[in-house]
Amino acid sequence: DGGITQSPKYLFRKEGQNVTLSCEQNLNHDAMYWYRQDPGQGLRLIYYSQIVNDFQKGDIAEGYSVSREKKESFPLTVTSAQKNPTAFYLCASTNTDTQYFGPGTRLTVL
Amino acid sequence: GEDVEQSLFLSVREGDSSVINCTYTDSSSTYLYWYKQEPGAGLQLLTYIFSNMDMKQDQRLTVLLNKKDKHLSLRIADTQTGDSAIYFCAESLIVRGSQGNLIFGKGTKLSVKP
């Protein structure tokens, strides 16, 4: 059953802690993306990776970091430098025509 | 730069048609997408259209593209309560023969009243 999985579904973090959000895909897609969604807002691009061992900053990369050691995996770390991390985080991957999304992780800072 | 605009809310009665509108900035070789998001879920791709097409129909969904006015619409025929969701319009550039990054509108919240 092909698709994109994100874990965990809900994540709670204390201020000052780093947390890592998982994104895995078995669609054999080369490109993967991380977006942030805030209430009433569209999606804003955090980081993207077109190929293994390479990634680029999106529009709001400050306070976030990523790695792309395997084609299937693109984890996102929300660092303590991110001042307002409470949001819904969406991972996506793409073939040449369309971008497919995972179910999302809701991160709440306590 | 690129920008995608859409109205924030739409309310219709069950059985009526819904029309969700979107405007985008002019880009060559662009795909335009409609995604659906239900509460607490990821985005589900509904349909997409290439910029050299005027219309695309898929069951209850009809996409119309007016390139002159840079206007895209999604029509849902016989709207059902299960269609209640947020609908996102998105634009993509073709970069070196492959899809580039997507630029999303803020989403239109469709409410379907019984």
Image (spheres, coloured by chain):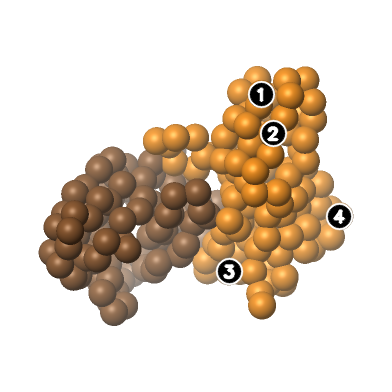
Numbered tag placed on residue A88 in the rendering: none
Q: Which circle's residue, 2 or 1, is located before the other in the chain?
A: 2
Seen in the picture, residue A34 relative to B63 is either above or below; the reply is: above
| Mark pair 2, 4: CA separation | 26 Å
Camera-side residue of A64 and B92: A64
- Measured in 3D between alpha carbons, the distance from the residue under mark 1 to the one under mark 3, in whole angstroms, is 40 Å
User: Which chain does the residue under circle 4 lie in?
Assistant: A
> Horizontal and vertical percent for residue B54?
25, 70
Mark 2–mark 1 CB contact (< 8 Å): yes
Q: Secondary structure at mark 2?
A: strand
**Image location of residue A4, percent across then percent down:** 65, 63
- Work out which quarter of the rendered image holds the N terminus of chain B and state it: top left
Among the two numbered marks 1 and 3 on one chain, the one whose residue lies closer to the N terminus: 3
Q: Residue at x 64, y 69 (%)?
A: A3
B57 and B71: which one is in front? B57
Residue type, label 4: Glu
Location of mark 4 (residue): A69
Residue placed under numbered mark 3 in the picture:
A96
Mark seen at residue A12: 2
Nearer the observer: mark 4 or 3; the answer is 4
Q: Earlier in the sequence, mark 2 or mark 3?
A: 2
Q: Chain of mark 3?
A: A
Residue highlighted by disc 1: A110
Mark 4 vs mark 1: in front = 1
Which mark is nearer the camera, 1 or 3?
Answer: 1
